[in-house]
Image (cartoon, rainbow, N blue to C red):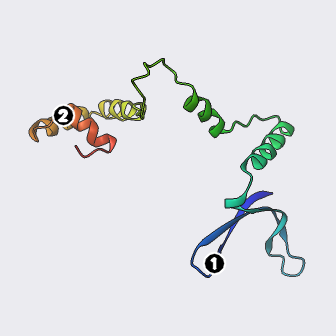
Amino acid sequence: MYLRTTKRKNKDGSVVTYYQLAQNVRHPQTNQPTARVIHNFGRADQLDRQQLVRLCQSIARVCELKVTDPLLLLEPALDTPLVDLPESLRLVRSLEFFPMLVIEALWERLGMGKALREVAAQSGSGACSLRARVAGNDS
């Protein structure tokens, strides 16, 4: 069994997605695999997401697995700051530096760090500019 999505194009050109619980079975005459719909969950844009999460958790419980909803993990972080900031200071966004540190460690391990620093020095930009470019900023 699997959760499948089907799409339908409306007359106005918009596309609607539907979720279905399906199972592959062999057709009795052609012996070709066909999808048999076990349950229609309905339109994706009208779906009760929590209903699907509860179903996943129920299946996980039977299989002795743990399922965590990543959206629930984010909600407390949005409501509760990790640090106490003065009221006049507001955190607008945070950046994740770990991927950049991994990339930098890899280029050093591969021996590319020296060559990249030389290129950055020749172009008149420093290591910070090099890091910004690798991180996706063109500054």
Spot occupied by residue 15 in the image (x, y as percentages of width and height): 61, 71
Circle 2 residue: 117
Quadrant of res 47: bottom right
Q: Number of callouts in the render? A: 2
Q: Of the residues shown, which amino acid type is indicated by label 1? A: Asn
Residue under the image location 21 percent in, 32 percent down:
127
Identify residue for label 1: 10
Decide: is 45 above or below 54: below
**Residue 103 occupies which quadrant of the picture?**
top left
Residue at the image point whose x is 58% and y is 73% from the top: 14
- Residue shown at 76%/49% (left/top)? 52
Crowding near the residue tagged with mark 2, few <14, some 14–19, many ≥20 C-alpha atoms within 10 Å: some
In this rendering, position of residue 42 left or right of residue 117 = right
| In the displayed structure image, the side of residue 7 where residue 51 appears, left or right | right
The secondary element bearing badge 1 is classed as loop
> How many other residues sit within 10 Å of disc 1, few (<14), some (14-19) or many (≥20)?
few
Measured as percent of width and height from the top left, residue 94 is found at: 42, 32
C-alpha span from label 1 to label 2: 54 Å
Instruction: Look at label 2 and name its amino acid.
Output: Arg
Which mark lies nearer to you, 1 or 2?
1
